[in-house]
Structures are given as structure tokens and as C-alpha cells.
Amino acid sequence: MFTLPKNVWLLTASLSLFMSLSVFVIFVGGIIGQTLAPSDSLSTLPVALLVVGTASGIIPINRIMSIFGRRKTFLGVCLYTLVIIALSIAALKIQSFYLFCSSTFLFGITTATMNQFRFAAIESVEENLSATATSAVLIGGLVSAFLGPELATLGRDLFETDFVGSFALLGGCFLIAFVLLWFYQQTDITEQVQNTPTRSLSSIIKQPVFIVAMSSAAVGYIVMSYLMTATPMSMHVIDGFSLEQTKFVIQSHVIAMFLPSLFTPIIVKILGLRKMMLTGVLLYFICVVLAYSGHALNNYWAALVLLGLGWNFLFIGGTSLLPQSYNESEKFKVQSANDFLIFSLQAIAALSAGWFVFNFGWEVVLLSVVPLLVMQFIILLWWLKEKSA
């Protein structure tokens, strides 16, 4: 892993800064929303709109990258994010819920861009190192697990209005990211592939490898986002756990999402991608059982840790499989379709999380993901059978 090219490590460091925004918004978005929203059921709307914005931004960002390349797009999005951070600060100062929601929606462009880092890493290495490159980049998420919540808590009381200082500190992260990405070397080719014959998108997405890759990443993200978005509301607002306790659970969850990336090459070598993804689904089942069994801090903590581990196995597996479904001339089209499907479904899950937890309770939230897990388990078993036939 440590012999990977400089590009991969620049992307790793930059991902830690970009992803701190996602963790930051997930951590405080519902809390700020609960303060500003006209009703509690709208509290998670700022977090949900981050996901909606991500889904909405995927196709435009991929189109921009296909024209200008990844490097210029990465740098431009750093500057764009600084402008949206200023908009968030303005929303907090005037106590406008809908302006704050608008800013989290616009942050979706940032997270849509961030989700291209994994493909940029894969393009920087040989095909046999794709899983290693993906896992290396996702190690940056370990830093974001601490950085996002710490920025929120450290900056909360810096100014008269709560969390204005937090957003100001977040802006510093994107200035640093801009400097790091300045040294990123362009690896994608935007001109040579234009005359290469390409298949239709409909024929590409019918391939079994695409179906398995997309569904694994999608189920991983949908279940993770849905339960993680509902957790701060269930813990802090409904069950009365402190902000520090809630922060500890969310940080532990994000660490669990990315810590396995240190060992992914070993895990893939032992289990293979398909068995690794099956293990991810089984971890999700255990997560649901633990969370359903009680509302104690330990239940939340253990469940969210398993939720993070399951996401890692499913998402890395799906991401590593996806390039097997397309060639160079088709990559932006297929990556756009894959991420749009994933994050559109994730947006629906995140939008419904607050409504479900406030109206039906934590237990119903947990049970509602079981059919999805059963479906993905069946898909992976079918894929294993097909490959072994």
C-alpha cells in the first residue's frame, strides 16, 4: 500500500478534508435544524438535502470533469465550497432555516466531487491495485471522523451565534485542500477517447457485474445514511444523550467506516471481493439486532460501529468491481449513472429518516431496512453461484 503513487496520497489527504464537511453536517445539521426548523419532523432536512444535493450534482460534475479534467474541477470546487460556507454562516446569523437548508443542498456539489476521488485513485494505479488504491483513499475518512465533529465543537462558541465559528474553521480545511490538489497530476484523458466506440448505457447497466457493483454500493450507502441520519435525533433529541455522547457514537461510526481500509488488501486476498461484500451484509444484520435490543449508549455505539464496518465492505467491494463494467471511453458516463443511482436512493433514505424516527420510533427505522438487506444478500449469493458455475 505504501508504494502507491503520490496522486493517491494527495487524494487521501484531500478526502479527509472534503469528507470533514460531510461528517460535520451530519453531526450538527440535525441539531441546527432542530433549533431553526418550524417543526421537529423537519430537523433532519438539512442533512437530507446534503444527500439530495449530492445526487443532483453527480451528473454536472462528471460532465465538467469530462471537459476540463479532474484537476481543474477539484480546484474549482474548493473555491466554490468556500463561497457556500459563507452562505451557511449568513444563514446562521440571520437564523434562517431555509437559507441554511439551501446551503447544505449546495454542499452536494462538494460531496459529489469528493466521491470522484476514489475513481481518480483507481486511474492512478494498475488494474490489480484498484481495491488497494480505493482503500488507501478512504483512509482519509479516519481523519474526517475526528476533524468534522471537532471543528463543530471547537468553533461552536467562538462567536455570538452558535456554530458560526465552526463553519469558519471548516473553511480553513478547503484552503488546505486547494493547496494539496494543486499538486495532483492529471491522469484522465479527455481527448483521446472521444473517437473510441462506446456502448449504450442501457447495455452496460444490464451486465451482472454492473448490477452487483451498483447494488452493493447503493445498499451500503442507503442503509448507512438512513440509520446514521436518524441516530443523532434518536440519541440526542429523543433519548436525551448529551452532545458529547452523541459525538462519540458518530465518531466511532465514521472510524469504523474507514479503519478497515488499512487492512482491505489482506481482507480481499483472504475473502475475495464477493465474500467480503456478503460479510458486509451480515454485519448490517447484526447491527440491526443490536440496535433493536435497547436504547443504552452501548447499544447505539456497537450498532453504529458495525454499521460502519458493513458499509466499508460493501462500498469498497462495489467500487472495485465497477471498472470491470466499462472501458476508458465509457468511464464518465458509467460513473455518473452509478453514483446518480446510489445517491438518489440515499437521498430518499436520508429525507425519510427524520420523519420515521419522530413519527414511528427508532425500532421501526431499524426494521424498515431488513427487506433491503435480504434483497442484497440474495443478489450476492446469485453472483457467487454465477461466478463459480
Image (tube, grey):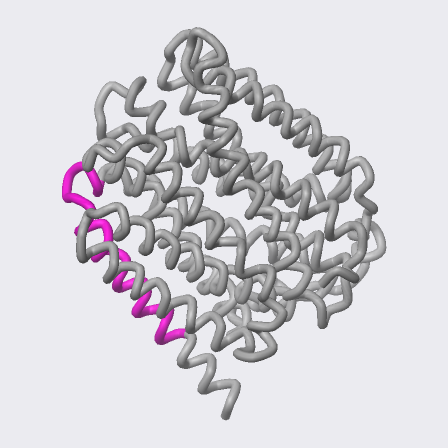
Is 278 drawn above or below residue 136 in the view shown? below
| Image location of residue 282, percent across then percent down | 35, 70
Q: Residue at x 45, y 35 (%)?
A: 50
Image quarter (top left, top right, bottom left or bottom right) of the N terminus = bottom right
Using the rendered view, name the quadrant where residue 26 is placed. top left
Is residue 387 visible in the rendered image? The answer is yes
Please give left or right for residue 81 compared with residue 292 in the image: right
Residue 57 in which image quadrant: top right
The rendered magenta stretch, by its main secondary structure, is classed as: helix
Front in this rendered view, residue 316 or 207: 316
Which region is colored magenta?
Answer: 356-379
> Residue 56, how many percent across, how many down?
50, 39
Up the image or down, 231 lies above or below 160; here it is below
- Residue at (42, 10) in percent of width and height: 161
The residue depicted at 30 percent of the width and 69 percent of the height is 374
137 in the magenta segment: no
Q: Position of residue 185 (x, y in %)?
A: 83, 46
- In the drawing, does residue 324 fall left or right of residue 361? right
- Kindly tell me whether residue 202 is visible in this rendering: no
Q: Nearer the viewer, residue 110 or 205?
A: 110
